[in-house]
Amino acid sequence: MRDRGFAVGEALLAVAIALAVGALFVLIADDSPATAYEALWTSSVGSTNALAQSMTTAIPIIVVGLGMGLAFRVGLFNLGGEGQMILGALTTAVVGHALASLPGAITFVLAVVSGCLAGAAWAVLPALWEVFLRVPLVVTTLLLNYVGALLATYLAAYPLRDESGGSTLAQTAEIPSALQLPIIVPNTPLHAGLFAAVLAPLGVLWLLQRTSLGYAMRMTGLNRDFAETGGVPMKRTIVTTMALSGALCGLAGALLVMGQTYRYLDDSIVSPQTAWSGLAASMLAGFHPLFTFVSGFFLAALQTGGSGLQLATNVPLQLVNVIQAVIIAMVAVRLWLGRRVLRR
Amino acid sequence: MIALEGIVKRFGALTALDGVDLTVERGTVHAVVGENGAGKTTLMGVLGGIVAADAGTVSLDGEPVRIASVEDAYAHGIGMVHQHFRLFRRLTVAENVVMGREPRRRGGYDHAAAEALVDELGRAHGLRVDPRARVGELSVGDQQRVELLRALHRAADVLILDEPTAVLTPQEAEGLFGVMRELAGQGRTVLFISHKLREVLTVSDTVTVLRRGSVTGVRRASETDERELAGLMVGRAIESAYQAPDTPAGEPVLRLEALTARGLKPLDLEVSAGEIVGVAGVAGNGQTELAEAIAGLRPREGGTLTIAGRALSDATVAQRREAGLAHIPEDRYARGLAREATIAENLLMGTHRRRFRLDRRAMNARARELVEAFDVRAGDVGDRAATLSGGNAQKLVIARELAGEPAVVLACQPTRGVDIGAAEFVHAQLRAARDRGAGVLLISADLDELLALADRIVVLYEGALVGESRDEAELGLLMAGAHA
Ligand SMILES: Nc1ncnc2c1ncn2[C@@H]1O[C@H](COP(=O)(O)OP(=O)(O)O)[C@@H](O)[C@H]1O
Ligand SMILES: [Mg+2]
């Protein structure tokens, strides 16, 4: 199957060039690229602990990337993954805490579902604006990131703030233990959310390739006029796609809360740029769900390795940023070229 | 006299030209016709210095010459206007025309002289274009004039025009034919490539027919007709005469009562089961709007629409299709298919909603049946639709739309840009749809097509239906707006 013009070979080439550029920077800084990359390797995948750490970081990146990528596949530039993820995280944390007295399984389901719904709502809003008011979705989704982040900060700092521990941080109360995902590799942070990161890509692939809704979505992405002429209801498809996309982003937030922070912790999503790493992973994967798992893990490993690199060598953490930036730039150029070719 | 002898050109395993002879008298318009891929462009490229032949000779007035580059061709007074324009959109008309041969003053480019020169040249040949206009802002017809002026400025005695009318409106084409005749009258030679036989017969003196890289005939235009030329082009007799239906038309299956939408005046129209109603008109008189209004892609502003007895004035596209409407869109790549989707996926569109699960095996099996039944020349149904040639892409659209035995077929420009063989197939399919009882509304800019297919022909002019006729002269008048 040949998807939106980004073959595996090209992705690998982008990565190779980025690593080469990174090596050049290390040389300029008068260091040995070999040592630097060795340190990067060791501290990202070189030990069980490092590997587990990388995989843990990858979980929300993969799921949020999957969500944003799903919208992109349909030609909807959902840049609001960050806001949708924040809303999902906050809602899961709050609902989980509020329903702590119910049986564990029920709390669990309701908390996860409400996190997905919150993410979906934050994505459906701009979809409705686009469909009924013709306000470009690419702008509104982006702006809603700021609204979502500020709203969550306010809620976590004031009305929903955790007063119990006397903490000075803006954070909500801890979720009940029934909601805390079990660690699956002892003495590492890797939690059961990994299963979601494995199953979600399969689910998205199934949706796109094996259901008529997914077919309509893909055809809309390939040629919207064609789909419309064939009877695909355009408004409904846009709203549905954005709802699914937002729900996945919300799920990414829920997984972060249930697997890592156990509460909504202010700025646990914006500063690490989780959503944007997700989009980069998705683009690098040519928006293919299964490849998104691989590229998401790769970018996460790069980030994990960055910290180790700084400890072991004189090379600053920024090397990782250089590598990531080069990859993203090349992928973006390639996609832009591909679109131009397709339009001809 | 311009003579090409024994020209052979191979592209890898493909022999594009297989020993072609072409003789052109100076001071005439000489047409080269043939289906897409026959080798017309390649042959002209040999004369224009763009294609290097593997064998054969070119001689001008008895002298053998070597034309190895475009500059060589110009040196021999040969200029080519390409199928796809090669203009600088951001430069002015004058700049484009004189590029490479600029008038100079004190070492710099002389704007005023260039503009005067282009003005003069345009006047002399009836090719008026504002020399100061930016090319990117011109209509396609005007851009073509710029290409012609450029070739003329380079003192071309022999002008090669590669499918110049493909992008023109009928009026613009008429204008171009005038220019071509005039150039020939001045003693220049015009080589005219086309696959539209009607215009070839009106404008040229001699016609050379190419088929699969070989010449299949040379005829004087006055001594041949479309039928013979079409036969030479495809290598067999072509059935293009009108065939009346065996049974009279039945109940109305498509009815428009005072239907209006943006760009359309209130329209009344009825298409009955078992008839083909043609809609004639010069492009841009509401054809697209009419099709979209019927298909459900353009909101209704008034009136009513009935399909197969069901009132569907404001129905969605899907509801209309459900009621039995098939839609062959005018631009197959814009609305007819998704180039990056597979052939099977393209064939599924419209029928995919039946179940939530998508059965890929059933989808592929059905696609294989349709590809077979509608003679779509395709590799595998899993290949992208972009791999299909224009004619086969259109067959794909036809296959999808006609497979469900629709009650109403809305066919828009169904043979635009496809070769004769594919066009003939499309026509046969539309006739077959009519004969099994469908009502066909055929919107076409090609009058020949309408006369060959339609049982009734109505004329669309400035968004209104202005009359009905089957007489060619009368239709021409109606299309030009000469109704009471
Ligand atoms: N540069 C090329 N490389 C390979 N094949 C070519 C090239 N140019 C033309 N052909 C092939 O040669 C044949 C004749 O093409 P062309 O002269 O463009 O036909 P026409 O102009 O009559 O439509 C076609 O099969 C075409 O695909
Ligand atoms: Mg050609």
Image (cartoon, rainbow, N blue to C red):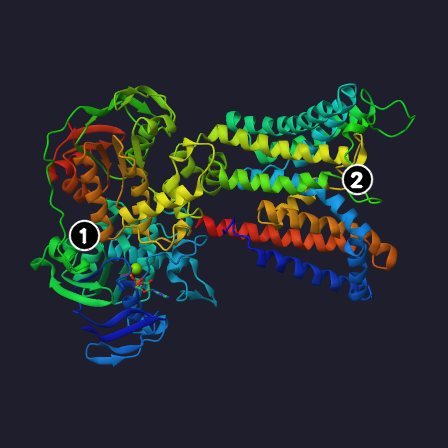
Where is residue B431? Give x, y as percent: 18, 39
Q: Chain of mark 2?
A: A
Name the residue carrying label 2.
Answer: A183
Q: Chain of mark 1?
A: B
Q: Is mark 1 within 8 Å of ligand 2?
A: no
Q: Judge the density around disc 1: few (<14), some (14-19), many (≥20) Cα neighbours within 10 Å.
A: some
Amino acid at pointer 1: Glu
Depth check, front residue: A73 or B198:
A73
Depth check, front residue: A275 or B183:
A275
The furthest residue to the bottom: B63
User: Would residue A53 appear left or right of A6 to someone viewing this image?
Assistant: right
Q: Judge the density around disc 2: few (<14), some (14-19), many (≥20) Cα neighbours within 10 Å.
A: some
Q: Quadrant of ligand 2?
A: bottom left
Amino acid at pointer 2: Ile
- Residue B63 image label: none
Where is residue A280? Give x, y as percent: 65, 47
Q: Is residue A202 above or below residue B181?
A: above
Where is residue A255? Give x, y as percent: 72, 35
At x 14%, y 52%, the residue is B238
Label 2 residue SS: loop
Occupied quadrant, residue B217: bottom left
User: Would residue A309 appear left or right of A129 to someone viewing this image?
Assistant: right
- Residue B199 image label: 1
Depth check, front residue: A9 or A199:
A199
